[in-house]
Amino acid sequence: MGIVLIQTTTSKYIMPKTIYIVDPVTREFLGTAEAPLDPVASERAGKLVYAEVNSANATGKMPPEHEIESDDVVLNSKGNWEVKRGAKAKRVEAEAAAFSEAEAQAKAERLKAQLAAMTDTERKLHSLREEDPAAFDADEAEEAQQTREAQALERLNRHEKRRDKRRADKAKENTSNGKGGGNNSNNSNDKKQINNQK
């Protein structure tokens, strides 16, 4: 947080008052903030008056020097700061380990539930995968490719049958409309010519 200067009515610049924020439950130091001004009291007094801070979550007392990454700084019940060297680093490590352990346990529970829900065939497939995952995955990929090819062939056959049916229907329609019956009119013309020759 940068330093902000406030201009008062007397044209003097003063640095704003800093307060130190603490967690209301753990009393751990969280960071700094500018103290809020009390506008009514400031107007009455003719000078800057800061609002009262809630002692449950802030203090005006600066915490001692500490390592932000590793130390816990806690405001005790008497309003004094205590530095617990390395406590934050240990807590973060413990939380990470607990999370990893909990995640591993949750994963094991999920796997156990999946195995319980499997059929005998699925269990056999699962055990085959466990024996040699790379070979199993290669087999699965090959099988998927064969399935795709078979499905494409089925689609091709269905489309060809539909095309052939459309062609047959169109030819039948043309025949019934007389378009395909050109041979009949030619035959009658041939008969007329033969009769004329006689």
Image (cartoon, rainbow, N blue to C red):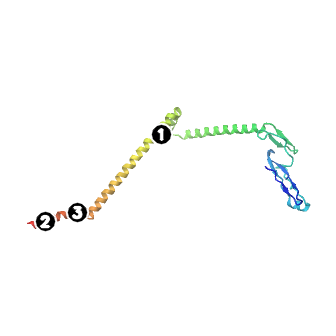
| Disc 2: which residue | 193
Q: Amino acid at mark 1?
A: Ala
Among numbered discs 2 and 1, the one appearing first in the sequence: 1
* Residue 179 sits above or below residue 19 on the image: below
Which part of the image, by quadrant, shows the C terminus?
Answer: bottom left
Q: Residues within 10 Å of mark 2 (few under 14, many from 20)?
A: few
Q: Please give the label number shown on residue 182.
A: 3
Q: Comparing marks 3 and 1, which lies closer to the viewer?
A: 3
Q: How many marks?
A: 3
| Disc 1: which residue | 141
* Residue 171 sits above or below residue 119 on the image: below
Residue at left 14%, top 64%? 191
Q: CA separation, marks 2 and 1? A: 73 Å
Q: Residues within 10 Å of mark 3 (few under 14, many from 20)?
A: few
Residue 27 position, x and y percent, is 81, 45
Q: Which type of secondary structure does the marked residue at label 3 adopt?
A: helix
Residue 56 visible from this viewpoint: no
**Quarter-of-image position of residue 64:** top right
Q: Amino acid at mark 3?
A: Gly
